[in-house]
Image: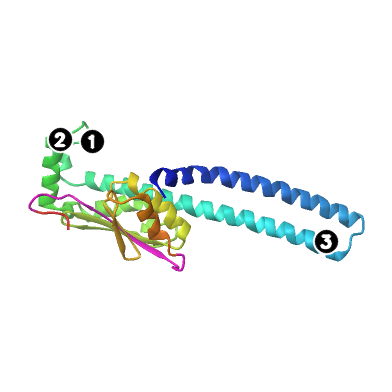
């Protein structure tokens, strides 16, 4: 699957769901009308059971489509949330209070100086209470959509966030947005991929194991220098 086809899939998914739901809504209405007519005409119990069963099956199919698409969208939203969380975490570093990048664009030299200063002091220089408040901003009570804990950690020049999903569709939605984020590495169920160096198929394959009940993930971000490479 190419990147273009991967994105096209996510764009067409909503239209497909609408067509399916609309089709089965009409089908359900038709069955109900037939059910009423047959009841008035004194139809046999077997006929009534068949028609009723078809209505139930159509309803189940509609609900499953809603559930699948809803889980996929939940994953996309979580991916967007962790990216925004990353951007704001970087801005919490004390070095930003001196250069004030939120007031005006930084030059390339200023960006390099900031990165070196962050590496020098480490992300550990960010007050833990600030990190806790920021995490709660995007994940209330530090829990994700599936009520699993979301853990944000700092370790020198590294930032990491980890949690898990209880649905392969949520995992797929999550991974579909990865290349739009600033995170550099993603690990799902102990398989690690470099985000920007990978193709869409490599990323989507991370969620391909349908035998798993849960999909744990870890995202990593790192500023590196010649003296301190990200390894």
Q: Is residue 158 left or right of residue 151?
A: left
Establish if 208 lies above or below 79: below
Residue picked out by circle 2? 108
Alpha carbon distance from label 3 to label 1 = 67 Å
Q: Residue lying farthest left?
A: 227
Establish if 190 lies above or below 171: below
Question: Label 2's element?
Answer: helix
Indicate which disc residue 224 carries: none
Please tell me which residue is depicted at 23% across the width and 43% down the height of the picture: 91
Mark 3: few/some/many CA within 10 Å (<14, 14-19, 20+): some
Q: Is residue 128 left or right of residue 120?
A: right
Q: Are marks 2 and 1 in contact (CB under 8 Å)?
A: no
Front-lying residue, 133 or 189? 189
- Magenta segment: does it hold 86? no
| In front: label 2 or label 1 | 2
Highlighted magenta segment, given as a residue range: 210-227
User: x, y percentage for residue 85?
Assistant: 31, 48
Q: Is residue 124 left or right of residue 175?
A: left
Q: Which sits earlier in the primary sequence, circle 2 or circle 3? A: 3
Question: Label 1's element?
Answer: loop
Q: Residue lying farthest front?
A: 1
Residue picked out by circle 1? 102
Front-lying residue, 177 or 9? 9
Q: Are marks 2 and 3 in contact (CB under 8 Å)?
A: no
Alpha carbon distance from label 2 to label 3 = 74 Å
**Snapshot quadrant of residue 129:** bottom left
| In front: label 3 or label 1 | 3
Q: Residue lying farthest top?
A: 104
Indicate which disc residue 48 carries: 3
């Amino acid at each position: 699957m190419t990147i273009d086809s991967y994105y096209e899939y996510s764009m067409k998914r909503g239209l497909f769901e609408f067509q399916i739901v609309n089709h089965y809504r009409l089908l359900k209405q038709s069955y109900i009308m037939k059910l009423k007519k047959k009841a008035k005409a004194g139809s046999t119990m077997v006929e009534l059971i068949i028609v009723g069963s078809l209505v139930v099956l159509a309803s189940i199919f509609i609900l499953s489509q809603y559930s699948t698409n809803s889980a996929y969208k939940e994953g996309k939203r979580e991916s967007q949330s962790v990216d925004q969380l990353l951007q704001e975490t970087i801005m919490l570093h004390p070095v930003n209070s001196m250069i004030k990048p939120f007031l005006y664009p930084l030059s390339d030299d200023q960006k390099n100086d900031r990165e070196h200063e962050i590496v020098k002091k480490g992300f550990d220089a960010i007050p833990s209470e600030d990190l806790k408040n920021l995490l709660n901003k995007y994940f209330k009570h530090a829990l994700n959509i599936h009520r699993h804990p979301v853990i944000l950690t700092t370790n020198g020049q590294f930032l990491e966030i980890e949690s898990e999903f209880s649905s392969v569709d949520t995992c797929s939605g999550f991974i579909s947005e990865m290349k739009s984020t600033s995170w550099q590495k993603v690990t799902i169920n102990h398989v690690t991929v470099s985000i920007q160096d990978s193709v869409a198929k490599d990323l989507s394959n991370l969620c391909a194991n349908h035998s798993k009940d849960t999909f744990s993930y870890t995202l990593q971000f790192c500023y590196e220098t010649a003296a301190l490479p990200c390894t």
